[in-house]
Amino acid sequence: MRARTVKLLLAAAATVVVCAASTGLSLRAEAQPSAAVVARVGDKAITAAEVERRIAQIPPFQLQSFGRTPDEIRRNFVSQVLVRELLLAQGAAAQKLTERADVQDRIRGVLRAALLQQIQAEAAASSPVTDEEVRAYYEANRDKFSAPPMVALWRVLVATREEAEAILAELKKDPSPQRFKDIARDRSLDKATSLRGGDLGFVAPDGSTAEPGLKLPPGLMEAAARVKDGELVPEPVAEGDRFAVLWRRQSRRPVSRSLEQEAPSIRQILAHAKAEAQVKQRLERLRAQDVSGHAPELVDLIDITSTGDLQPLRRPGTLASSRRPGAPPPSPVPRQDMR
């Protein structure tokens, strides 16, 4: 349906004549369909090739909003979209809007995005990601695609068995997560985890955790394996010369994703890395070619507050004002009578 609609629109593009005296348009058809000038706005021309390119980008259901017949759709699209764009663009140029700083920022953003898109397309065409590269990445990063079964543990570490038994007795009366966290914050000797309410996170079968330098001894893992998710280990567990109160919170099944499952995402990662390498090379070349002056020390004059607000520039040697931004100036001090 879409291809048929586009063909109908393009077949008549060379013979369309639209008159719009109020906008000063002059529409005409020429011998070659692709070079035919469909409309002129000021010194700019809209050719049949441009109409073809723009219409091809629009889904069929949106084309239907421009009219009921191909001829009506074509005419309305040219006048309501293409001509309107040129009129607004030339109006903006006449008002010198391109000289405004915010407009220049947006123009640079559009140009930057277009260049990045072009570099990505060039990188994909010149150096496509191969199956061998995907397989090599998978083999080098197997730990990202597989994980052993793990259990989430909470722990309170105390000095004596008697203290651990007293804590277990308290938790049997009030087995709530909040009570466990309160006890861990107040009494646990492991200060690295007590501030998290004793939460050790997910622990691997070998006792390794996400906490740097924290690995649980085998005895704790064996004790945790004897209870179900959500259950307290009923007895204190020795941990060196100390004792732990353990709560097994939940389990996580082992994860093992095959090369076939991860291949699409790996291709995206590698394609992005290749494009980034191309961007870096282009930046280095452009920097050597176009950057003629660089004085980064001047930005030290810009003061940024802890909240991210910018403060006015201060001349060297001046004292910073203690008055908050937006605060009223201080009231003048009344002069005393010196008589």
Image (spheres, helix red, strand yellow):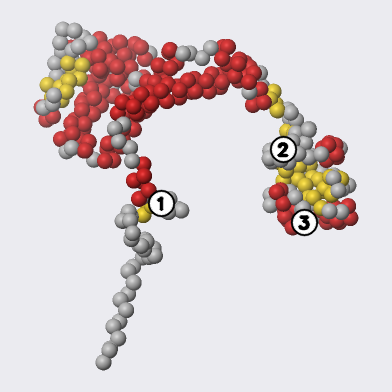
Given the image, on which type of amino acid does mark 2 rest?
Thr
Q: Label 2: which residue?
A: 209
For this view, does 202 lie left or right of residue 79?
right
Q: Position of residue 147 (x, y in %)?
A: 70, 28
- Residue 250 visible at all: no
The answer to whether marks 3 and 2 mark residues whose Cβ atoms lie closer than 8 Å is no
Looking at the picture, tell me which residue is in the foreground, 321 or 171: 321
Given the image, on which type of amino acid does mark 1 rest?
Ile
Q: Label 3: which residue?
A: 187
Q: Position of residue 3 (x, y in %)?
A: 35, 12
Q: Is residue 114 above or below residue 190?
A: above
Question: Which residue sits at x=28%, y=88%?
Answer: 337
Name the element at disc 3. Answer: helix
Q: CA distance from mark 2 to mark 1?
A: 38 Å
Given the image, on which type of amino acid does mark 3 rest?
Arg
- Residue 147 visible at all: yes
Q: Is residue 254 above or below residue 321?
A: above
View extreme (top): residue: 31
For this view, does 49 lie left or right of residue 133?
left
Name the element at disc 2. Answer: loop
Q: Which mark is residue 304?
A: 1
